[in-house]
Image (cartoon, grey):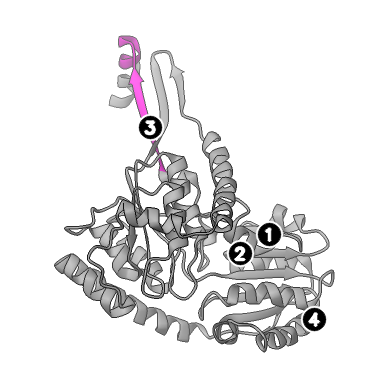
Amino acid sequence: MIRHLKRGKDAAAIAAADAQVRSVVEGILRDVEQRGDEAVRACSRRFDQWDPASFTLSRAEIEAAVKSLSARELEDIRFAQAQIRNFAQLQRDSMKDVEVETLPGVVLGHRHIPVDNVGCYVPGGKYPLIASAHMSVLTAKVAGVPRVVSTAPPYQGKPHAAIVAAMHLAGADEILVLGGVQAVAAMAIGTASIRAVDMLVGPGNMYVAEAKRQLYGRVGIDLFAGPTETLVIADDNVDGEMCAVDLLGQAEHGPTSPAVLLTTSEKLARETMAEVERQLGALPTAEIARQSWADYGEVIVCDTIDEMVAKADEIASEHVQVMTSDPDVFLRRMHNYGALFLGPRTNVSFGDKVIGTNHTLPTNKNARYTGGLWVGKFLKTCTYQRVTSDEASARIGAYCSR
């Protein structure tokens, strides 16, 4: 039997909030389409109090940002990018062009062709996410994308130097300081000063995610990646303190970030709820984490592992942290998740920042039908065919004409 010790907001309240977001985004996209740069600049002034002479950074500004960082900061960026590049390259090498003669004189094949122009959104706002530059720009470049435009909001009234440096070191061809819906709209629609891209990638808040949804079709997108989600699957091999740390480590990302505990131990469930409250008393990000936990936190108790697997697949969370006696059970049996973090040593933050897998992952149950961003998302698998003899053409033609 599956029972909830804690639930978040009801579906109707969430749907009402989503409708409001849709309406706001529709208005901004319409305005950018009609007024171009003027609308982009107006939104930037309104939402970010940011009105530079140009949203695109010059080479001198980029170099100044890199030089402003300490040796340790640069080493941290380079280390993370090395891990991400290595894994992305391994994935790229696994994708082979093929050509085969299926019948005498009939040749079929496919090629993996990079998208020409990609726009990468790097979240900023209250908590700039430097690693998103690695995950998007670097992965696109490993795939062979010729033109990568990368953008992030201003931070405290100026470009965020570490994000700019990370974009540059990852290989971005153009770097913008522009955030929110206006940024993805400018890249997708194009303006007099910002040349349009063919594809948008990267995570963002609910407004950015909704903008990508509405722009899909005009441009390609990686996936619908909204506010971060985490599911902690645990049994009595771990304690409430560890579970609470992992839940709040994602809940603090934003006020609409779901954090769910799934366990076979009611004792652990109750210990974790008490520990969450204790940690919220000391957490620097408690204001946001408390709202997220109150509105989107859940604690679910199951009787069996089978029930936990079924419920986890139903939830289809972005991040799944497994801390049980045999984590590989969930690796073998789960089908719907963005990324698995197996065992108590494998913290979700490792994947968010540095371990090498991509942190742009499906949210909102979209893991039912897609995985996360990876090098293959930037490649079009295009087929071709060639008939090399009259005999083959006649044979195929005979079947085709019947």
Which label belongs to residue 383? 3
Which secondary structure lies at badge 2? strand
Query: Residue 42 appears at what percent x and percent y?
Result: 22, 75
Q: Nearer the viewer, residue 141 or 338?
A: 141
Q: Is residue 3 left or right of residue 303?
A: left
Task: Identify residue for label 4.
Answer: 266
Mark sitting earlier along the chain (4/2): 4
Quarter of the figure that contains the N terminus: bottom right
Q: Is residue 298 left or right of residue 192?
A: right
- Determine whether the residue tagged by mark 1 lies in a helix, strand or loop: strand
Residue type marked 3 = Thr
Distance (Cα) linking label 2 and label 1: 8 Å
In the rendered image, residue 388 lying in the magenta stretch gets the answer: yes
Q: Looking at numbered disc 2 in the image, what kind of residue is underneath it?
A: His
Magenta residues?
379-394
Foreground label between 4 and 2: 2
Quick check: marks 2 and 1 in contact, CB under 8 Å? yes
Q: Measure how far apart labels 3 and 1 are at the Cα level.
A: 36 Å
Q: Disc number at residue 4?
A: none
Number of residue marks: 4
Q: What amino acid does circle 4 point to?
A: Glu
Q: Is residue 229 above or below residue 286?
A: above
Relative depth, front residue between 14 and 176: 176
- Residue 199: % across, % down: 34, 52
Mark 3 and 1 residues: CB-CB less than 8 Å, in contact?
A: no
Q: Position of residue 147 (x, y in %)?
A: 33, 45
Q: Answer yes or no: do the residues labelled 4 and 3 have beta carbons within 8 Å?
A: no
Whole-angstrom CA distance, mark 4 to mark 3, is: 54 Å
Q: Residues within 10 Å of mark 1 (few under 14, many from 20)?
A: many
Q: Is residue 39 above or below residue 383?
A: below
- Residue displayed at 54% across by 60% down: 367
